[in-house]
Amino acid sequence: MGVGVGQILSRIENVLPKLTKSEQKVARFVLEAPDEAMFMSVQEMASRSLSSSASVVRFCRSIGLKGFPELKVALSADLAQGQKTGYFDLNKNENTTVLVDKILSNVIQSLKDTVGQLDVEMIEKVAHSLYKAPVIFAYGIGASALVAEDIAQKWLRMGKNVYAFHDIHVLTMSMANAPKGSVFIGISYSAATKEVLQLMKFAQKSGLTTVSFTGFGRSELSDISDFNLFTSLAPEAKVRSAATSSKHSQFFVVDVLYYAYASININDSIDKITRTRKATNELKNLSET
Protein backbone atom coordinates (compact mmCIF):
# COMPACT_ATOMS: atom_id res chain seq x y z
CA MET A 1 0.00 0.00 0.00
CA GLY A 2 1.50 3.30 -1.03
CA VAL A 3 2.03 6.10 1.46
CA GLY A 4 1.03 9.60 0.44
CA VAL A 5 3.25 12.51 1.35
CA GLY A 6 2.28 14.03 4.66
CA GLN A 7 -0.49 11.56 5.54
CA ILE A 8 0.96 8.97 7.93
CA LEU A 9 0.28 10.79 11.23
CA SER A 10 -3.35 11.29 10.28
CA ARG A 11 -3.60 7.63 9.31
CA ILE A 12 -2.17 6.51 12.67
CA GLU A 13 -4.58 8.80 14.51
CA ASN A 14 -7.55 7.48 12.57
CA VAL A 15 -6.85 3.75 12.95
CA LEU A 16 -5.72 3.95 16.59
CA PRO A 17 -8.92 2.38 18.00
CA LYS A 18 -8.51 -0.65 15.71
CA LEU A 19 -4.97 -1.47 16.84
CA THR A 20 -4.06 -3.99 19.54
CA LYS A 21 -3.09 -2.65 22.97
CA SER A 22 0.62 -3.16 22.33
CA GLU A 23 0.36 -1.50 18.91
CA GLN A 24 -1.52 1.42 20.48
CA LYS A 25 1.46 2.05 22.78
CA VAL A 26 3.68 2.41 19.72
CA ALA A 27 1.10 4.56 17.94
CA ARG A 28 0.71 6.98 20.85
CA PHE A 29 4.47 7.40 21.14
CA VAL A 30 4.81 8.12 17.42
CA LEU A 31 1.96 10.65 17.56
CA GLU A 32 3.46 12.38 20.60
CA ALA A 33 7.05 12.49 19.34
CA PRO A 34 7.20 12.00 15.56
CA ASP A 35 10.35 14.12 15.28
CA GLU A 36 12.15 11.72 17.63
CA ALA A 37 10.58 8.55 16.24
CA MET A 38 11.87 9.17 12.71
CA PHE A 39 15.49 8.82 13.90
CA MET A 40 15.05 5.76 16.12
CA SER A 41 15.81 2.10 15.62
CA VAL A 42 13.15 -0.56 16.17
CA GLN A 43 14.67 -1.40 19.54
CA GLU A 44 14.77 2.25 20.66
CA MET A 45 11.13 2.79 19.71
CA ALA A 46 10.12 -0.40 21.50
CA SER A 47 11.88 0.79 24.65
CA ARG A 48 10.46 4.33 24.55
CA SER A 49 6.92 3.11 23.88
CA LEU A 50 7.10 0.42 26.58
CA SER A 51 6.30 -2.26 24.03
CA SER A 52 8.45 -4.75 22.09
CA SER A 53 10.32 -4.88 18.80
CA ALA A 54 7.71 -7.32 17.48
CA SER A 55 4.94 -4.87 18.40
CA VAL A 56 6.70 -2.08 16.51
CA VAL A 57 6.94 -4.23 13.38
CA ARG A 58 3.31 -5.36 13.69
CA PHE A 59 2.25 -1.74 14.17
CA CYS A 60 3.92 -0.77 10.89
CA ARG A 61 2.07 -3.51 9.04
CA SER A 62 -1.24 -2.71 10.73
CA ILE A 63 -1.12 0.84 9.38
CA GLY A 64 -0.45 -0.41 5.86
CA LEU A 65 3.34 -0.09 5.68
CA LYS A 66 5.78 -2.74 4.48
CA GLY A 67 8.04 -2.29 7.46
CA PHE A 68 9.83 0.02 9.89
CA PRO A 69 12.03 1.81 7.31
CA GLU A 70 8.90 2.92 5.43
CA LEU A 71 7.51 4.38 8.67
CA LYS A 72 10.61 6.56 9.08
CA VAL A 73 10.35 7.79 5.49
CA ALA A 74 6.64 8.56 5.93
CA LEU A 75 7.26 10.45 9.18
CA SER A 76 9.95 12.49 7.48
CA ALA A 77 7.50 13.40 4.71
CA ASP A 78 4.82 14.34 7.24
CA LEU A 79 7.11 16.64 9.18
CA ALA A 80 8.48 18.20 5.99
CA GLN A 81 4.96 18.99 4.79
CA GLY A 82 3.95 20.64 8.04
CA GLN A 83 0.69 20.75 9.97
CA LYS A 84 -2.24 18.92 8.43
CA THR A 85 -5.49 20.68 7.68
CA GLY A 86 -7.32 18.67 10.31
CA TYR A 87 -10.84 17.51 11.17
CA PHE A 88 -13.24 19.78 13.03
CA ASP A 89 -16.57 19.13 14.68
CA LEU A 90 -19.47 21.59 14.58
CA ASN A 91 -20.62 23.52 17.64
CA LYS A 92 -23.87 25.03 18.86
CA ASN A 93 -24.88 28.27 17.10
CA GLU A 94 -21.92 27.96 14.76
CA ASN A 95 -21.17 31.01 12.64
CA THR A 96 -21.99 30.03 9.06
CA THR A 97 -18.67 31.34 7.73
CA VAL A 98 -16.79 29.24 10.30
CA LEU A 99 -19.04 26.29 9.47
CA VAL A 100 -18.12 26.53 5.78
CA ASP A 101 -14.41 26.60 6.65
CA LYS A 102 -14.71 23.60 8.97
CA ILE A 103 -16.61 21.47 6.48
CA LEU A 104 -14.17 22.37 3.72
CA SER A 105 -11.26 21.46 5.99
CA ASN A 106 -12.87 18.12 6.81
CA VAL A 107 -13.44 17.30 3.15
CA ILE A 108 -9.90 18.29 2.15
CA GLN A 109 -8.34 16.30 4.98
CA SER A 110 -10.49 13.27 4.20
CA LEU A 111 -9.45 13.37 0.54
CA LYS A 112 -5.78 13.87 1.43
CA ASP A 113 -5.83 10.95 3.86
CA THR A 114 -7.60 8.74 1.32
CA VAL A 115 -5.05 9.55 -1.39
CA GLY A 116 -2.30 8.84 1.13
CA GLN A 117 -3.47 5.27 1.62
CA LEU A 118 -4.73 4.56 -1.89
CA ASP A 119 -3.35 1.27 -3.23
CA VAL A 120 -2.96 1.85 -6.96
CA GLU A 121 -2.22 -1.80 -7.71
CA MET A 122 -5.41 -2.83 -5.90
CA ILE A 123 -7.43 -0.29 -7.89
CA GLU A 124 -6.07 -1.76 -11.12
CA LYS A 125 -6.85 -5.33 -10.05
CA VAL A 126 -10.43 -4.43 -9.14
CA ALA A 127 -10.85 -2.51 -12.41
CA HIS A 128 -9.78 -5.56 -14.43
CA SER A 129 -12.07 -7.83 -12.40
CA LEU A 130 -15.00 -5.52 -13.16
CA TYR A 131 -13.99 -5.39 -16.83
CA LYS A 132 -14.18 -9.19 -17.09
CA ALA A 133 -17.29 -9.56 -14.91
CA PRO A 134 -20.53 -10.59 -16.66
CA VAL A 135 -22.53 -9.13 -13.74
CA ILE A 136 -21.64 -6.63 -11.00
CA PHE A 137 -23.49 -6.30 -7.68
CA ALA A 138 -22.98 -3.38 -5.27
CA TYR A 139 -24.58 -3.17 -1.83
CA GLY A 140 -24.55 -0.77 1.08
CA ILE A 141 -26.95 0.47 3.76
CA GLY A 142 -27.83 4.08 4.55
CA ALA A 143 -25.32 6.53 3.12
CA SER A 144 -23.30 3.62 1.72
CA ALA A 145 -26.33 2.76 -0.44
CA LEU A 146 -25.72 6.05 -2.27
CA VAL A 147 -22.21 4.86 -3.09
CA ALA A 148 -23.62 1.56 -4.39
CA GLU A 149 -26.06 3.48 -6.61
CA ASP A 150 -23.23 5.65 -7.91
CA ILE A 151 -21.31 2.50 -8.87
CA ALA A 152 -24.39 1.11 -10.62
CA GLN A 153 -25.00 4.30 -12.58
CA LYS A 154 -21.38 4.64 -13.69
CA TRP A 155 -20.94 1.06 -14.87
CA LEU A 156 -24.34 1.00 -16.57
CA ARG A 157 -22.95 3.76 -18.77
CA MET A 158 -20.13 1.36 -19.61
CA GLY A 159 -22.61 -1.23 -20.81
CA LYS A 160 -22.23 -3.54 -17.82
CA ASN A 161 -24.99 -5.53 -16.16
CA VAL A 162 -24.81 -3.94 -12.73
CA TYR A 163 -27.29 -3.96 -9.86
CA ALA A 164 -27.57 -2.10 -6.56
CA PHE A 165 -30.60 -3.81 -5.03
CA HIS A 166 -31.83 -2.47 -1.69
CA ASP A 167 -33.73 -5.67 -0.89
CA ILE A 168 -31.27 -8.16 0.59
CA HIS A 169 -33.48 -11.12 -0.41
CA VAL A 170 -33.63 -10.05 -4.06
CA LEU A 171 -29.87 -9.51 -4.05
CA THR A 172 -29.25 -12.94 -2.51
CA MET A 173 -31.42 -14.65 -5.14
CA SER A 174 -29.65 -12.78 -7.92
CA MET A 175 -26.19 -13.71 -6.65
CA ALA A 176 -27.20 -17.34 -6.22
CA ASN A 177 -27.66 -17.60 -10.00
CA ALA A 178 -24.89 -15.21 -11.03
CA PRO A 179 -22.56 -16.48 -13.79
CA LYS A 180 -18.93 -17.29 -13.09
CA GLY A 181 -16.70 -14.24 -12.79
CA SER A 182 -19.42 -11.97 -11.40
CA VAL A 183 -18.33 -9.42 -8.80
CA PHE A 184 -19.88 -8.35 -5.50
CA ILE A 185 -18.86 -5.03 -3.93
CA GLY A 186 -19.78 -4.73 -0.25
CA ILE A 187 -19.73 -1.15 1.05
CA SER A 188 -19.51 -0.37 4.76
CA TYR A 189 -17.56 2.61 6.07
CA SER A 190 -17.44 1.07 9.55
CA ALA A 191 -16.67 -2.40 8.12
CA ALA A 192 -19.13 -3.68 10.71
CA THR A 193 -22.51 -3.62 8.92
CA LYS A 194 -23.85 -7.11 9.57
CA GLU A 195 -25.94 -7.27 6.39
CA VAL A 196 -22.91 -6.42 4.23
CA LEU A 197 -20.80 -9.01 6.05
CA GLN A 198 -23.54 -11.62 5.61
CA LEU A 199 -23.80 -10.90 1.89
CA MET A 200 -20.02 -10.97 1.51
CA LYS A 201 -19.91 -14.46 3.01
CA PHE A 202 -22.74 -15.58 0.72
CA ALA A 203 -21.00 -14.10 -2.32
CA GLN A 204 -17.81 -15.97 -1.44
CA LYS A 205 -19.77 -19.19 -0.99
CA SER A 206 -21.47 -18.64 -4.36
CA GLY A 207 -18.14 -18.24 -6.15
CA LEU A 208 -18.31 -14.51 -6.87
CA THR A 209 -15.23 -12.31 -6.84
CA THR A 210 -15.59 -10.11 -3.77
CA VAL A 211 -14.53 -6.52 -3.10
CA SER A 212 -14.84 -4.82 0.29
CA PHE A 213 -15.06 -1.03 0.38
CA THR A 214 -14.50 0.26 3.91
CA GLY A 215 -12.77 2.81 6.10
CA PHE A 216 -9.08 2.06 6.50
CA GLY A 217 -8.09 -0.79 8.79
CA ARG A 218 -8.18 -4.54 9.03
CA SER A 219 -11.61 -6.09 9.67
CA GLU A 220 -13.46 -9.35 9.22
CA LEU A 221 -15.05 -7.87 6.10
CA SER A 222 -11.70 -7.03 4.51
CA ASP A 223 -10.16 -10.33 5.64
CA ILE A 224 -12.72 -12.48 3.81
CA SER A 225 -12.77 -10.38 0.61
CA ASP A 226 -10.67 -11.04 -2.47
CA PHE A 227 -9.90 -7.33 -2.87
CA ASN A 228 -10.02 -4.36 -0.51
CA LEU A 229 -10.71 -0.69 -1.24
CA PHE A 230 -10.15 1.79 1.59
CA THR A 231 -11.00 5.39 2.36
CA SER A 232 -9.65 7.43 5.25
CA LEU A 233 -11.17 6.65 8.63
CA ALA A 234 -12.06 10.04 10.08
CA PRO A 235 -12.17 10.62 13.86
CA GLU A 236 -15.58 10.32 15.48
CA ALA A 237 -17.48 13.61 15.59
CA LYS A 238 -20.45 14.57 17.76
CA VAL A 239 -22.57 15.51 14.77
CA ARG A 240 -20.75 13.32 12.23
CA SER A 241 -19.22 16.27 10.38
CA ALA A 242 -16.07 14.26 9.67
CA ALA A 243 -18.09 11.17 8.80
CA THR A 244 -20.08 13.23 6.30
CA SER A 245 -16.85 14.25 4.58
CA SER A 246 -15.92 10.57 4.31
CA LYS A 247 -18.61 10.22 1.66
CA HIS A 248 -16.63 12.59 -0.54
CA SER A 249 -13.70 10.20 -0.20
CA GLN A 250 -15.87 7.21 -1.09
CA PHE A 251 -17.12 8.89 -4.24
CA PHE A 252 -13.54 9.92 -5.03
CA VAL A 253 -12.34 6.30 -4.88
CA VAL A 254 -15.26 5.23 -7.08
CA ASP A 255 -14.24 7.92 -9.59
CA VAL A 256 -10.63 6.69 -9.58
CA LEU A 257 -11.82 3.11 -10.09
CA TYR A 258 -14.17 4.22 -12.87
CA TYR A 259 -11.46 6.00 -14.83
CA ALA A 260 -9.03 3.12 -14.28
CA TYR A 261 -11.71 0.85 -15.73
CA ALA A 262 -12.38 3.18 -18.66
CA SER A 263 -8.69 3.37 -19.53
CA ILE A 264 -8.48 -0.41 -20.08
CA ASN A 265 -10.18 0.13 -23.44
CA ILE A 266 -10.51 3.87 -23.76
CA ASN A 267 -11.98 3.94 -27.29
CA ASP A 268 -14.71 1.44 -26.40
CA SER A 269 -15.41 3.33 -23.16
CA ILE A 270 -15.80 6.64 -25.00
CA ASP A 271 -18.15 5.02 -27.54
CA LYS A 272 -20.38 3.61 -24.79
CA ILE A 273 -20.47 6.86 -22.84
CA THR A 274 -21.31 8.74 -26.04
CA ARG A 275 -24.18 6.35 -26.82
CA THR A 276 -25.67 6.65 -23.34
CA ARG A 277 -25.36 10.44 -23.43
CA LYS A 278 -27.08 10.51 -26.81
CA ALA A 279 -29.87 8.25 -25.53
CA THR A 280 -30.54 10.40 -22.46
CA ASN A 281 -30.44 13.57 -24.56
CA GLU A 282 -33.05 12.11 -26.92
CA LEU A 283 -35.22 11.23 -23.94
CA LYS A 284 -34.85 14.78 -22.65
CA ASN A 285 -35.86 16.17 -26.04
CA LEU A 286 -38.96 13.94 -26.11
CA SER A 287 -40.06 15.17 -22.68
CA GLU A 288 -39.74 18.79 -23.82
CA THR A 289 -41.94 18.33 -26.92
Image: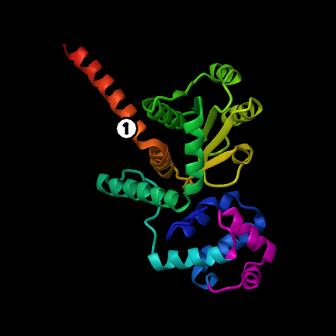
Q: Which residue is drawn at the image coordinates 63% and 74% (left, top)?
A: 71
**Amino acid type at mark 1:** Ile
Q: In the rendered image, which quarter contains the N terminus?
A: bottom right
Residue position marked by numbered label 1 in the rendering:
270
Q: Which residue is drawn at the image coordinates 60% and 41% (left, top)?
A: 129
Q: Quadrant of residue 158?
A: top left
- 77 lies left or right of 29: left
Is 232 placed above or below 170 here? below
Is disc 1 surrounded by few (<14), some (14 to 19) or many (20+) residues within 10 Å?
some
Q: Main secondary structure of the magenta part?
A: helix
Magenta stretch? 39-68
Residue 215 picture location, percent across and down: 59, 50
Is 165 placed above or below 263 here? above
Residue 25 picture location, percent across and down: 72, 71
Q: Secondary structure at mark 1?
A: helix
**Residue 70 seen in render:** yes
Residue 209 picture location, percent across and down: 67, 37
Q: Which residue is drawn at the image coordinates 56% and 68% (left, top)?
A: 8
Is 56 contained in the magenta span?
yes
Considering every residue shown, the one lying at the far left of the view is 289
Is 226 placed above or below 287 here? below
Is 19 placed above or below 272 here? below
Q: Which residue is drawn at the image coordinates 32% and 24% (left, top)?
A: 280
Residue 41 picture location, percent across and down: 71, 85
